[in-house]
Image: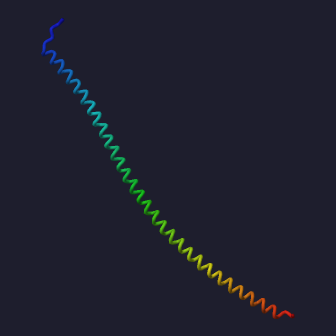
Amino acid sequence: MEDISKKEILDAISEFATSVDKRFDGVDKKFDDVDKKFDSIDDRFDRLETKMEDGFASIRTEITELKTELNARIDTLDKRTQEDSQVNMQDYSDLKERVEKLERQISQMQPA
C-alpha cells in the first residue's frame, strides 16, 4: 500500500470541501432565485388585492348611489300613485253624482 502523507490527505479534504462549497453555492443561488420569484409573486398578489379592494369599494359606492336613487324614485312613484288614486276617487264620486242627477232628471221627465 502506498503511503499517503498528511498533506495529501489535507489537500484531498480541502479539494472535497471546495467542491461541496461550490455545490452549496449553486443551491444557495437557486434558492435566492426562488425567493426572488416568490417576492415577485407576493408583490403581484398585493397589487391585485389592492385593485380588487378598490374595485369592490367603487362597486359598493355605485350600488349605494343606485339604491338611494331607486328608493327616491319609488317614493315619488308611490306619492303619485296615491295622488292619482285620490283624484280618480274624486272623479268617480263627481261622475256618480252627475249620473244620479241625470237619472233623477230623466225620471222626472218621464210621465208617471
* x and y, in percent, of residue 98 in the image: 72, 88
- The reply, left or right, for residue 64 in relation to residue 20 is right
Check the image and name the residue furthest to the top.
1
Check the image and name the residue furthest to the front.
112
Quadrant in which the N terminus appears: top left
Q: Residue at x 81, y 94 (%)?
A: 108
The answer to whether 80 is drawn above or below residue 68 in the figure is: below
* x and y, in percent, of residue 91 in the image: 66, 84
Locate residue 112: give its quadrant.
Answer: bottom right
Q: Residue at x 59, y 80 (%)?
A: 83
Nearer the observer, 14 or 99: 99
* x and y, in percent, of residue 34 in the image: 31, 37
Name the image colouring.
rainbow
Check the image and name the residue furthest to the right.
112
Q: How many numbered circles does the render carry?
A: 0
* x and y, in percent, of residue 89 in the image: 65, 81
Nearer the observer, 30 or 3: 3
The answer to whether 76 is drawn above or below residue 48 in the figure is: below
- The reply, left or right, for residue 34 in relation to residue 13 is right
- The reply, left or right, for residue 87 in relation to residue 27 is right
Q: Residue at x 16, y 16 (%)?
A: 9
Q: Residue at x 44, y 59 (%)?
A: 59
